[in-house]
Image (cartoon, rainbow, N blue to C red):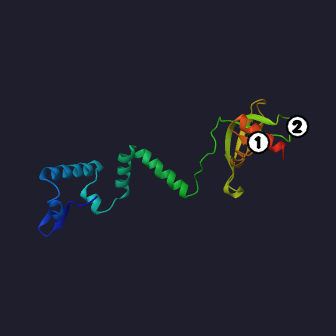
Amino acid sequence: MKRLTKRTNEGVLLSEENEERYTFIELIDILLERLAAYEDTGLTPEDLKHGLNAAVRKKLACEYFGLSTSQVSHIEELVQADKDGKLEVLPIDIGTDVFALRPGMPWCAPITACSVKNIVFHPPENGNRMYILAEVKADRGLHIRFSPEDIGRTVFFTHEEAEKALEEVRHE
């Protein structure tokens, strides 16, 4: 934003280049528009002089994104958890239906329909790994376990994807 004013020993004046550029009415409109935009921020001159502290930044985020202060606080907690290595984005939702390839197991169908029941995290001393537990639909109580890396390789979201992968496995 280009300045309209300049500060001098006498006070605040309109800059020379703007004196001839705008009519008085145009200048009043511009000044009122800028004043309204400033007032919309909810900031005070003291806020700007002393820098934007955490409370002011939170207030701006609430207004800009239309969030409550508790929502912004929750986002701050998530950011800190991510920095601390405590945040994982889950690769799949509980209840998602998946189709697992089981071609080398003669006692079950080569493609097994399952429903995700649980996501388990191993503690850091055991490699900090995640695995997904899915219940076999045709045999309640029987579960398969797979890792996020298996999605798209041996576990699929559609039966068609699983069939295509199974054909590739059979032709190898």
Q: Position of residue 83 (x, y in %)?
A: 54, 58
Instruction: Check the image and name the residue furthest to the right.
Output: 106
Residue density around tag 1, few if under 14, some if 14–19, many if 20 or more, within 10 Å: some
Q: Which quarter of the figure is the N terminus placed in?
A: bottom left
Q: Is residue 117 left or right of residue 59?
A: right
Q: Position of residue 104 (x, y in %)?
A: 86, 42
Distance between mark 2 and mark 1 Cα atoms: 18 Å
Residue underneath mark 2: 106
N-term-proximal mark, 2 vs 1? 2
Labels 2, 1: front one: 1
Q: Position of residue 165 (x, y in %)?
A: 76, 42
Compared across the picture, whether 119 is left or right of 104 comes to left
Residue placed at 30% from the left, 63% from the top?
50
Residue 70 — which label?
none
User: Residue at coordinates 63% horizontally, 45% vertically from top-left?
Assistant: 91
Residue on which the image places disc 1: 165
Percent of width and height locating residue 71: 44, 45
* Mark 2 neighbour density, 10 Å: few (under 14) some (14–19) many (20 or more): few
Q: Amino acid at mark 1?
A: Ala
79 up-or-down from 50: above or below? above
Total marks shown come to 2
Front residue (pair 44, 70)? 44
Does dot 2 land on a helix, a strand or a loop?
loop
